[in-house]
């Protein structure tokens, strides 16, 4: 059975081809059929579509909490004004592991003024509230929801739907910002460099000079390849129902034909005239068929992070971004769908499957540095390297030894018993650091934005040690 959100199909059929960015927005966060905003099914975990590092092992969130603590120490242990901001918190597992870890360090915990969560989906906001052991959630301002968490003796948790709705950066605040598997969900545009067609350079009319003599046509600027946007178009002739049985052929092959496909725009559009013309992509334009993926939404988010850290008074705070993508190349052809733990076409099950694209870490770094001269960027480094430097092996071993010491005879071999837990800790931590097809240690990268310091202090996990 194929399930495609009718409103997405209809939109594309009515408006004609749309950008990949518009398609991603429709599929992921629209009020009508968005995967994160209207889907009542579970997205995360074994019974959902995908599993993320915080859901694999509590050690991940604990070490992220430790990382922020090393920054808090290195930045002079501010006694108040610390804000935690998480964008795209999913089920809230990461923030709850961070707060539980920080709760063990009373001076740091009591310096936290507020936890801000940026989340588009209402259902997910409710799940986050329950993960953070919050009381009732109330709308305290237009589109700002608040609840009190049991962590840190009633820490205030606030939600907004978009980073633009957070309060403006203030002086004497230390924003600690975390984005885990968030940037890969932000919309991208894709462009292809297209060689001019011969007829574009040949005019039927002969040009004449002032004296009426035929003119030699100057080498035309249109001989230069042009960027064209890749657009999403429907493969269906007319509206189909939101749920349609697969054709016998496609169900037999278990590989239904996608509802949409990509097509290269016939002409330039405002996006193709602006976005790929930046210096970062210039060298590719002259090579026809080159492709690039660009995410202006990602730039908007990271610039907001940088401005919070680098603006007003002495720069302070840190942003930690963990996501998948190449370390030093521009992503291409990376849009993918994920359903029931398998990679599928991004053009199947629109609105009922996750879709994501590789994160361009170089573009994120450029955007952060363009936003303000008061920040510096470290990384990206592989997640395995980052977590190993933070001591993941030692932490996992301590947890396993703790279980060994406390085990009783009865609960040893029961399902969910001590042996099972020990195996889960072991396999979980290895999956976070190792490479290979199932491992997340190499494909995922960590990058940090910090107050500008002339590159003199490397943060922990990026080659530096604990200072302070
Ligand atoms: N960080 C979590 C969840 C990752 S999934 C984890 O690692 O488990 C992506 C998250 O970002 C979801 O919570 C989703 O609802 C949210 N999200 C995706 N696009 C968004 C957008 N444009 N604005 C706000 N939240 C968004």
Image (cartoon, rainbow, N blue to C red):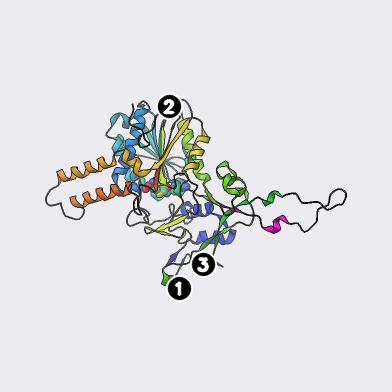
Q: Residues within 10 Å of mark 2 (few under 14, many from 20)?
A: some
Which of pointers 1 and 2 lies earlier in the amino acid sequence?
A: 2
Judging by the rendered image, the residue that carries numbered circle 1 is 249
Question: CB at mark 1 closer than 8 A to ligand 1?
Answer: no
Q: Residues within 10 Å of mark 1 (few under 14, many from 20)?
A: few
Question: Is 194 positioned to the left or the right of 91 in the image?
Answer: right
Is 147 in front, or is 458?
458
Mark 2, secondary structure of its residue: loop
Write the residue at 30% across / 28% down: 107
| Viewport quadrant of the C terminus | top left
Q: CA distance from mark 1 to mark 3?
A: 18 Å
Mark 1, secondary structure of its residue: helix
Q: Which label was assigned to residue 172?
A: 2
Question: Is 218 positioned to the left or the right of 415 in the image?
Answer: right
Which of pointers 1 and 3 lies earlier in the amino acid sequence?
A: 3
Looking at this rendering, what residue extends furthest in the front direction?
216
Q: Position of residue 148 (x, y in %)?
A: 34, 38
Judging by the rendered image, the residue that carries numbered circle 3 is 240
Q: Nearer the viewer, mark 1 or mark 2?
A: 1
């Amino acid at each position: 059975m194929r399930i495609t959100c009718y409103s997405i199909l209809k939109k594309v059929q009515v408006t004609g081809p749309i950008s990949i960015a518009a398609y991603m927005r429709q599929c992921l966060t629209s009020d009508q059929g968005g995967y994160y905003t209207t889907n009542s099914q579970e997205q995360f975990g074994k019974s959902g579509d995908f599993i993320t590092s915080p859901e694999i092992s509590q050690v991940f969130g604990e070490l992220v909490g430790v990382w922020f603590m090393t920054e808090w120490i290195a930045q002079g242990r501010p006694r108040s004004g610390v804000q935690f901001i998480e964008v795209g918190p999913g089920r809230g597992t990461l923030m709850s592991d961070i707060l539980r870890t920080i709760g063990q360090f009373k001076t740091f915990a009591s310096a936290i003024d507020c936890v801000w969560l940026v989340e588009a989906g209402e259902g997910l906001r409710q799940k986050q509230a329950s993960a953070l052991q919050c009381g009732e959630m109330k709308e305290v301002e237009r589109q700002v929801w608040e609840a009190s968490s049991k962590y840190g003796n009633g820490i205030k948790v606030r939600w907004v739907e978009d980073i633009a709705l957070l309060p403006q950066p203030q002086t004497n605040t230390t924003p600690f910002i975390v984005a885990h598997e968030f940037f890969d969900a932000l919309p991208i545009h894709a462009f292809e460099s297209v060689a001019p067609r011969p007829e574009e350079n040949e005019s039927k009319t002969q040009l004449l000079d002032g004296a009426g003599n035929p003119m030699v046509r100057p080498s035309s600027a249109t001989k230069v390849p042009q960027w064209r946007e890749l657009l999403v178009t429907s493969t269906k002739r007319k509206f189909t129902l939101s749920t349609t049985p697969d054709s016998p052929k496609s169900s037999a092959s278990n590989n239904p034909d996608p509802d949409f496909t990509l097509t290269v725009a016939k002409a330039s559009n405002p996006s193709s005239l602006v976005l790929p013309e930046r210096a970062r992509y210039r060298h590719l334009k002259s090579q026809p068929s080159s492709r690039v993926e660009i995410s202006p939404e990602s730039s908007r988010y990271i610039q907001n992070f940088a401005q919070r850290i680098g603006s007003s008074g002495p720069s302070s705070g840190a942003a930690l971004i963990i996501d998948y993508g190449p370390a030093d190349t521009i992503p291409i052809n990376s849009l993918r769908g994920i359903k029931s733990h398998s990679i599928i076409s991004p053009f199947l099950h629109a609105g009922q499957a996750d879709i994501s694209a590789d994160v361009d870490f170089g573009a994120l770094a450029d955007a952060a540095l363009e936003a303000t001269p008061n920040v510096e960027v470290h990384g990206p480094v592989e997640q395995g390297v980052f977590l190993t430097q933070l001591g993941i092996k030692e932490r996992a071993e301590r947890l396993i030894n703790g279980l060994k010491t406390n085990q009783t005879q009865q609960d040893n071999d029961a399902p969910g018993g001590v042996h099972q837990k020990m195996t889960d800790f072991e396999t979980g931590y290895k999956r976070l650091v190792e490479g290979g097809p199932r491992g997340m240690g190499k494909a995922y990268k960590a990058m940090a934005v910090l107050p500008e310091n002339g590159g003199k202090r490397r943060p922990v996990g990026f080659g530096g040690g604990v200072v302070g």
